[in-house]
Image (cartoon, rainbow, N blue to C red):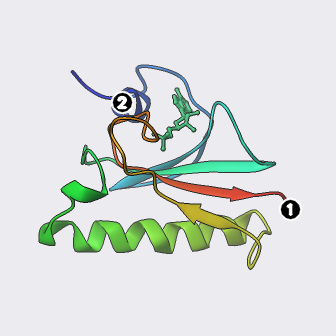
Amino acid sequence: MSSVFTKIINREIPSDIVYEQDNLIVIRDINPIAKTHLLIIPKKEIVTVDDIDEQDRDLIADMFFTAKKVASNLGITWAYQLHFNVWKEWWQEVMHIHMHLTSNK
Ligand code: AMP
């Protein structure tokens, strides 16, 4: 079964899409914990950080470059936090790797 994020990527369910490129998408979190709360999501359905392997190097780097780019586009350069939740039993709700970008600016 595909993840909720794959369904968003495939336009099967709606989302507020901020940015998209060939290998990832950026959406607004449906339940924001900050004034700005984005999710940077690879289109490849990797479960969590523990499941990253060598062939994902460029993709993971692209997540960081994209965080920098969207932060700049939103005018929050130098004023945001990035985090990953990695704990299947509790913190991580969606089993499809994603980087949170939050800012109260
Ligand atoms: P995590 O706990 O790291 O797995 O975070 C998953 C995040 O995905 C949470 O902050 C949720 O609010 C968010 N989320 C879940 N479903 C959706 C959705 N359909 N659209 C946007 N964000 C979502």
* Residue labelled with disc 1: 105
Instruction: Classify the position of the N terminus by image quarter.
Output: top left
Residue 50 position by quadrant: bottom left
In this rendering, the answer to whether 46 lies above or below 8 is below
- Earlier-in-chain disc, 2 versus 1: 2
Tag 2 secondary structure: loop
Instruction: Classify the position of the C terminus by image quarter.
Output: bottom right
Question: How many neighbours does mark 2 have within 10 angstroms: few (below 14), some (14-19), or many (20 or more)?
Answer: few
Q: Position of residue 74 (x, y in %)?
A: 75, 62
Left or right position of 85 against 34: left
* Residue labelled with disc 2: 10
Q: Position of residue 26 (x, y in %)?
A: 53, 50
Tag 1 secondary structure: loop
Residue at the bottom extreme of this rendering: 78
Which residue is depicted at the point 38% across and 51% down? 86
Q: Type of residue at label 1? A: Lys
